[in-house]
Amino acid sequence: EAQVTQNPRYLITVTGKKLTVTCSQNMNHEYMSWYRQDPGLGLRQIYYSMNVEVTDKGDVPEGYKVSRKEKRNFPLILESPSPNQTSLYFCASGGGKHTYEQYFGPGTRLTVT
Amino acid sequence: RKEVEQDPGPFNVPEGATVAFNCTYSNSASQSFFWYRQDCRKEPKLLMSVYSSGNEDGRFTAQLNRASQYISLLIRDSKLSDSATYLCVVNHGFNKFYFGSGTKLNVKP
């Protein structure tokens, strides 16, 4: 089954404790991206990657890091989480004939206290 | 000014009704346009891409008006299962995407 998976689905952590949210896709997509969704603000793009070792900033990259060492994986790293990073995070991938059509993972609900 | 703006709704319509949403975008260089639906904080799911000539998929029709910088989504013969939030998405090229905050649709029996 074609899918994008994220782990963990739910995470409660404390300020400053480094964490990683994993994202993996099995569709051989070149494009992958991370978004956060906050009430009233819609989804905002954090980082995206056009291919292995190619990443670029979206609209809200501050406080986040990413890496793309393999085509299928695109982890999101919060080196020192803060309460304003409490949000719902989605990973997405896209590629093939319609490069810009994205398919989303189930989301990770992060709470930073 | 927001890149993409949508009326948040909610649009409350009876089953069988026709309903239309608009979405405006600010960057005239925008290249690709999409509609996604999202159910109650679940992941967005692609509904349809929006092509310059307009396109139709069953009960759903999408239109693009580049001159006025808006896209529209028309849903005919609404079903209870159409109740969701509809997200307008715009791409400027360079693989950056901008999402509207969504329009909520409630279809009532």
Image (cartoon, rainbow, N blue to C red):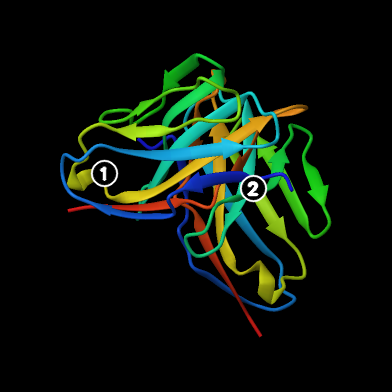
Q: Position of residue A74 (x, y in %)?
A: 50, 30
For label 1, the SS is helix
In this rendered view, identify the residue nearer to me: A47 or B102. A47
Q: Position of residue B96 (x, y in %)?
A: 50, 26
Q: Is residue B75 left or right of residue A9?
A: right
Whether residue B66 is visible, yes or no, is no
Q: Is residue A60 left or right of residue A93?
A: left
Q: Chain of mark 1?
A: A
Q: Is residue A92 above or below residue A7?
A: above
In this rendered view, identify the residue nearer to me: B65 or B88. B88
For label 2, the SS is strand
Which quadrant: the C terminus of chain B? bottom right
Q: Position of residue A109 (x, y in %)?
A: 38, 54
The residue identified by callout 2 is B72
Q: Chain of mark 2?
A: B
Hey, what amino acid is under mark 1?
Answer: Gln
Label 2 CA crowd tier, 10 Å (few <14, some 14–19, many 20+):
some
The residue identified by callout 1 is A85
